[in-house]
Amino acid sequence: MLNENFLLVGALLLFVAVLAGKAAYRLGSPALLLFLGVGMLFGYNDFVLFDSMDLAEFIGMVALCIILFSGGMDTKFSDIRPVMAPGVVMATLGVILTAVIVASFIFLVAPLLNLSVEMTFPLAMLLAATMSSTDSASVFSILRTKKQGLQENIRPLLELESGSNDPMAYILTVVLVGIVSGGADLDWGEAISTFLIQMIVGAGLGYGFGRATVWVINRINIRSNPSLYSVLLLACAFFTFSFTTIAYGNGYLAVYIAGLVVGNLRIVHRNMLRTFFDSFTWLLQIVLFLILGLIVDVQDLLDPDVLYMGLAVGLFMIFVARPVSTAVCMLPFRKFTTKARLYVSWVGLRGAVPIIFALYPLTHNVANADYLFNVVFLVTIISLLVQGNTVSSMANWLGLSFEEKEPTFKLTVPDQIRSEFSEIEVNKAMIKNGNTLKDISLPGHTLVVMVCRGDNYFVPKGKTELRPGDKLLVVSDNNDELIQQVENMGIQNIIKM
């Protein structure tokens, strides 16, 4: 009955997690926080026992691999191109600055807290390194679930940073685990060379495998069973990560770049593949956060040594370390307003990644690894509670948010069609020279396919009268020219399908 019981408990956990996700959406809270809470609830007093750190680390690796690949697929290169430079600086220098600032704070404040754990500076650096990167799962999930637009290209900047800063935190953590566990001195030359090799090999192989993946999927003929394309893409993602890691590159960076390449090139069955990876990513996020919740002991989090240090570090990271590192990294980039810089510093979410990295000291038998893990876990909860719950309200308060309109027309366009569809809302300026469709000036090779008026949909003719508020489904061979022309009419409500 062991297997049946395992499936029963697993099904129950997933069911409760889905209900928690629905509740989180209504309450405006991060769904991942409630997934974590469900795991902690079921793990309380060993109601559901899960104590394999090695298995948790493996599941975390697999989940993070797919989360980064899927995040890259959903990111348009045209969106991140303007913020490439600040994103890379935040993902590298920002991580180092955060680790150093937080480690210095931990080392100075530890004696004041009378800890039972001797907090040496290398141990403080290790603790800070595990928390030095923002969490891609949290950032992708919260920003995309909120359906909230952000001005000044803030959203692609945050997504690029969270998707590409894990390699730096990973390298810092691995190097410091070796130093703390082995008692060796830090060799800065070796650490820098390791970082450069991992980043260069990871970026190169990620791009190469991304192009190869597109070529394979477009050339292989399995249209008799299209579902196998999802399996093939999944295999390509895992192969990219594992081969890059074996080749001494950073697998996490490689899968993110590979996903970015795949998502920005034409591939067959794109919509089906996106749907599969969206669903699979959510499943892995749920499983990951449930397991992380199961392996922590709530009583350990309430221990005074953990509680005081976790609260101090969590609040320090939110209000000091993240703002300082963000200010330094964004100093050369003058195009961002002060409000944008404040918002970027606020959305420095911690989540699954710091907890996963905090498992490394445990699996490598580092002294006081349990204490480090519990502090990281508590800091993550504080970050999700304070920052995760205020992503929307902070954007509104700073005047950086705008409503992302959902398209009225729900379309699934085959990848072979080169023309692009857009949804345009008619305003008075558009019909000032005449209110019929033939009176509207549109670019060549552009066609109004359908009109939505209230709850009614109809196919228009040249003499069809248009009214302000009508929504037009437009197909064009030159979408950029179409958008430019309607924007000149004062129309801002344009949705690319």
Image (cartoon, helix red, strand yellow):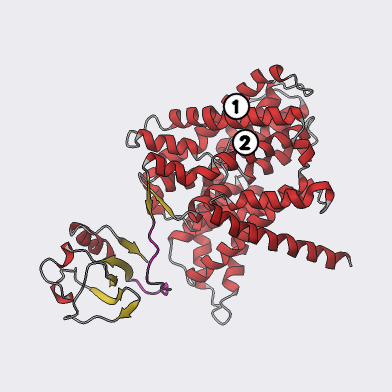
Report whether 259 appears left or right of 372.
left
Residue picked out by circle 1: 102
Seen from the viewer's position, the closer of residues 286 and 329 is 286
Does the rendering let one see residue 296?
yes
SS for dot 1: helix
Report whether 473 appears left or right of 248.
left
Q: Position of residue 330 (x, y in %)?
A: 41, 33
Q: Position of residue 298 (x, y in %)?
A: 76, 41
Q: Position of residue 315 (x, y in %)?
A: 58, 30
Report whether 283 appears left or right of 275.
right
Assign the C terminus to one quadrant of the image: bottom left
Q: Quadrant of residue 9?
A: bottom right
The amino acid type of the residue labelled 1 equals Val
Instruction: Find out whether residue 286 is within the magenta segment.
Output: no
Q: Which residues are magenta?
A: 404-418
Seen from the viewer's position, the closer of residues 124 and 215 is 124
Assign the N terminus to one quadrant of the image: bottom right
- Name above or below for residue 393 compared with residue 416: above
Seen from the viewer's position, the closer of residues 470 and 201 is 470
The residue at the point 37 percent across, 51 percent down is 402
The numbered mark at residue 243 is none
Mark 1 nearby-residue class (10 Å; few <14, some 14–19, many ≥20) = many
- Name above or below for residue 185 compared with residue 39: above
Q: Quadrant of residue 22?
A: bottom right
The amino acid type of the residue labelled 2 equals Met
Instruction: Find out whether residue 407 is within the magenta segment.
Output: yes
Residue picked out by circle 2: 131
Q: Position of residue 463 (x, y in %)?
A: 16, 81
Query: Between disc 2 and disc 1, whose residue precedes?
Result: 1
Q: Do the residues under discs 2 and 1 have CB atoms within 8 angstroms?
A: yes
Does the rendering let one see residue 61?
no
